[in-house]
Image (cartoon, rainbow, N blue to C red):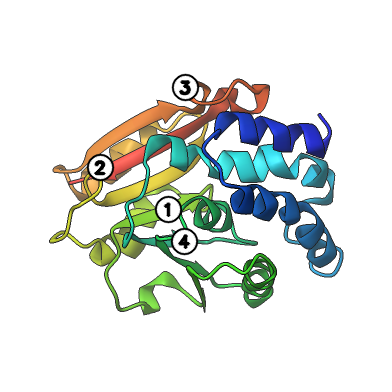
């Protein structure tokens, strides 16, 4: 599917998008291409599928939850800005902190955010353990096993301020059989609730047949 067709699919999945949001999503291709030619943060063989495999995949989270204004989200291992940048476009009144240990990847994500004139993104180069502030949700996309992500970031979940439709917690985009990851997670904290949703609940493209959204809360 051509990038323009992929973009139109996103518009059809999210009919409530404003003209500004459509323009920002449209800009993603040219801005990422410019930076990807300098710093390879998206596989070159995958770039033609940018909107499907990266943008729409990220926006599965927006199908699961509509973040309320004032929500604070930490995006771990954001790479070139996924899922953080697409989500920041959809939720301009939500604060997104994008963190990655690789400086050149954060440089790209920051440049994309600047080109789109996003005002709700913050960027951190380093490890998540260095942070010192609370968040309502932690997101990640195929960065590490659930158990590892939980160990890194569970102390940052704000347990005192729930105001979204979902309890504060973790929203991960994963693939494949996750049962061992869930067992390892339960071994750390038996009180955790783990919910798994196939992305085919939201999207019809073949790419999503093995993809899942994992929601973890206590």
Q: Which disc, if any, is residue 76? A: 4
Q: CA distance from mark 2 to mark 1?
A: 14 Å
Q: Nearer the viewer, mark 3 or mark 4?
A: 3
Q: Which residue is mark 3?
A: 201
Check if mark 4's residue and mark 2's residue have beta carbons within 8 Å. no
Q: Nearer the viewer, residue 86 or 207?
A: 86
For the point 60% across and 20% down, which residue is it?
204
Labels 4 and 2: the sequence-earlier one? 4
Q: Is residue 1 above or below residue 119?
A: above
Labels 3 and 2: the sequence-earlier one? 2
Q: Is residue 87 above or below residue 17?
A: below
Q: Where residue 142 appears, x then y in whole percent?
A: 53, 47
Q: Which residue is mark 1?
A: 139
Q: Where residue 149 appears, x then y in whole percent?
A: 39, 55
Q: Residues within 10 Å of mark 2 (few under 14, many from 20)?
A: some
Labels 3 and 4: the sequence-earlier one? 4
For the point 42% across and 33% down, which residue is it?
178
Q: Helix, strand, or loop for circle 2?
A: loop
Labels 1 and 4: the sequence-earlier one? 4
Check if mark 3's residue and mark 2's residue have beta carbons within 8 Å. no
Q: Residues within 10 Å of mark 4 (few under 14, many from 20)?
A: many
Q: Residues within 10 Å of mark 3 (few under 14, many from 20)?
A: few
Q: Which quarter of the figure is the N terminus placed in?
A: top right
Q: CA distance from mark 3 to mark 4?
A: 24 Å
Check if mark 1's residue and mark 4's residue have beta carbons within 8 Å. yes
Q: Which residue is mark 2?
A: 166
């Amino acid at each position: 599917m051509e990038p323009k067709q992929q973009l139109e699919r996103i518009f059809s999945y999210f009919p409530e998008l404003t003209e500004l949001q459509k323009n920002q999503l449209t800009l993603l291709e040219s801005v990422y291409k410019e930076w990807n030619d300098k710093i390879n943060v998206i596989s070159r063989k995958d770039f033609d599928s940018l909107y499907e495999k990266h943008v729409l995949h990220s926006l599965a989270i927006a199908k699961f939850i509509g973040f309320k204004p004032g929500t604070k989200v930490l995006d771990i291992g954001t790479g070139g800005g996924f899922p953080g940048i697409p989500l920041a476009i959809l939720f301009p009144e939500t604060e997104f902190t994008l963190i990655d240990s690789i400086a050149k990847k954060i440089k790209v994500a920051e440049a994309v955010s600047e080109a789109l004139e996003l005002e709700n993104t913050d960027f951190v180069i380093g490890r998540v353990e260095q942070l010192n502030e609370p968040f309502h949700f932690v997101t990640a996309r195929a960065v590490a096993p659930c158990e590892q992500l939980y160990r890194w970031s569970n102390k940052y979940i704000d347990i005192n301020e729930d105001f979204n439709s979902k309890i504060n917690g973790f929203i991960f985009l994963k693939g494949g059989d996750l049962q061992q990851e869930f067992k390892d997670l339960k071994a750390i904290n038996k009180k955790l609730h783990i919910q798994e949703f196939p992305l085919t609940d939201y999207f019809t493209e073949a790419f999503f047949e093995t993809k899942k959204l994992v929601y973890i809360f206590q």
